[in-house]
Amino acid sequence: MAHIYSSDRLDEQLVQLLNESDPRIRVYVYRMIDNRKIKPALYVGRPFEDLESYIRDKFGGGLFYIMIRRGEIMLLAGTIAFELPLSDPRRQSLSI
């Protein structure tokens, strides 16, 4: 499974797809635990520019699997990882 941020090409493709206006495009976001995609999806819907911030703030830190499709066609799939949001109280306990 490709890590999206480890490749400039995949990272650029993600940014382009999040700004795509095609109404047929759907984003599926799953949490990853022990290298497994946990179902059901946390988010299924249209892409939007701040999707990465939304995932981090709504679902906390960790590893996520993102799949972007146009109908039956897979446009992008891979993992992304986020730190805990700044507002998360667990982050305070990690500070030195």
Image: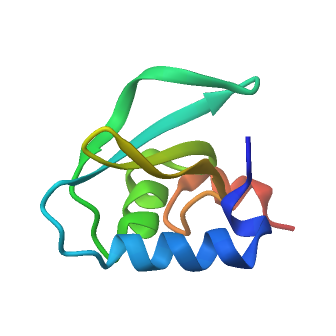
Find residue 4 and report its horizontal and vertical position in percent.
67, 61
Considering depth in this image, is 33 or 24 the residue closer to the camera? Answer: 24
The one of 73 and 96 positioned closer to us in this rendering? 73
Left or right: 30 in relation to 61:
left
| Farthest-out residue, right | 96
Residue 58 shown left or right of residue 66 in the figure: left
Q: Quadrant of the C terminus?
A: bottom right
Q: Position of residue 21 (x, y in %)?
A: 18, 75
The part of the image, by quadrant, that contains residue 46 is bottom left
**Point 31% across, 42% down: residue:** 43
Q: In the image, is residue 49 above or below residue 5?
A: below
Residue 79 pos. (x, y %): 64, 48
Left or right of 32: which side holds 35? right
**Outermost residue, left direction?**
23
Residue at position x 58%, y 80% from top? 12
Rendering colour mode: rainbow
Q: Nearer the viewer, residue 31 or 10?
A: 10
